[in-house]
């Protein structure tokens, strides 16, 4: 069963020219990798996603009002290496935080609140960089 935040992400996965490809849910923020048609699609997609996540959290917490203190930070990924680094960071972010807290983490573990675990929430990428280009930057075995 999906968490309320995961259901909100799934409902917003492909809307307004915004396509959610990877994500990681943290205690107080989200990391997302999305494909967008243009800046307007990014703004509308993020606004819709923010509303859905805020409503889901408010419902679970029995509260009302603003959930996110800040707006989003956007960065266009332009090279295979940049995409590979971003995907690794997003899918392993909770594990990175756990390791910083001194918790034992298996090196092959998948963050249970990331798109590496919850693939049904995201869409398949359409751009070359996110489909296969980033694999060129991965170290060979």
Image (cartoon, grey):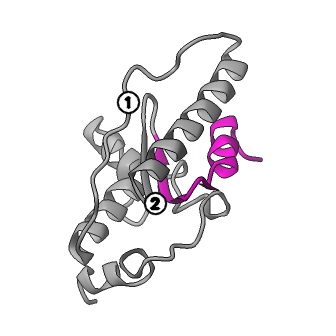
**Percent x, y of residue 134:** 32, 78
When the figure is inspected, residue 140 is found, relative to residue 89, above or below; the finding is: below
Q: What residue is at 63 percent from the left and 38 percent from the top? A: 5
Q: How crowded is mark 2: few (under 14 residues within 10 Å), some or many (20 or more)?
A: many
Work out whether residue 17 or residue 111 is closer to the camera in this orientation and state it. Answer: 17
Q: In this view, does 12 lie to the left or right of 126?
A: right
Work out which residue is located at the far right of the displayed protein and give it.
1
Question: Do we see residue 120 in this rendering?
Answer: yes
**Which disc, if any, is residue 36?**
2
Return the residue at label 1: 71
Q: Is residue 2 magenta?
A: yes
Viewer-closest of 85 and 47: 47
Image-based side of 85 in relation to 19, left or right: left
Q: In this view, does 80 lie above or below 56?
A: below
Highlighted range, magenta: 1-25
Asked whether 57 or 77 is in front, the reply is 77
In the picture, which quadrant includes the C terminus?
Answer: bottom left
Residue 26: % across, % down: 45, 37
Label 1 CA crowd tier, 10 Å (few <14, some 14–19, many 20+): few
Does 80 appear above or below 50?
below
């Amino acid at each position: 069963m999906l968490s309320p935040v995961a259901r909100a992400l799934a409902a917003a996965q492909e809307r307004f020219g915004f396509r959610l490809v990877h994500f990681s849910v943290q205690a107080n923020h989200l990391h997302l990798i999305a494909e967008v048609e243009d800046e307007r699609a990014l703004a509308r997609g993020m606004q819709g996603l923010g509303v859905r996540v805020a409503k889901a959290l408010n419902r679970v917490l029995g509260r009302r009002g603003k959930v996110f203190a800040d707006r989003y930070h956007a960065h266009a990924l332009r090279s295979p290496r940049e995409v590979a680094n971003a995907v690794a960071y997003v899918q392993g972010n909770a594990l990175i935080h756990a390791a910083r807290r001194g918790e034992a983490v298996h090196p092959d573990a998948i963050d249970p609140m990331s798109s590496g675990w919850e693939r049904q929430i995201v869409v398949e990428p359409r751009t070359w960089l996110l489909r296969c280009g980033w694999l060129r930057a991965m170290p060979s075995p």
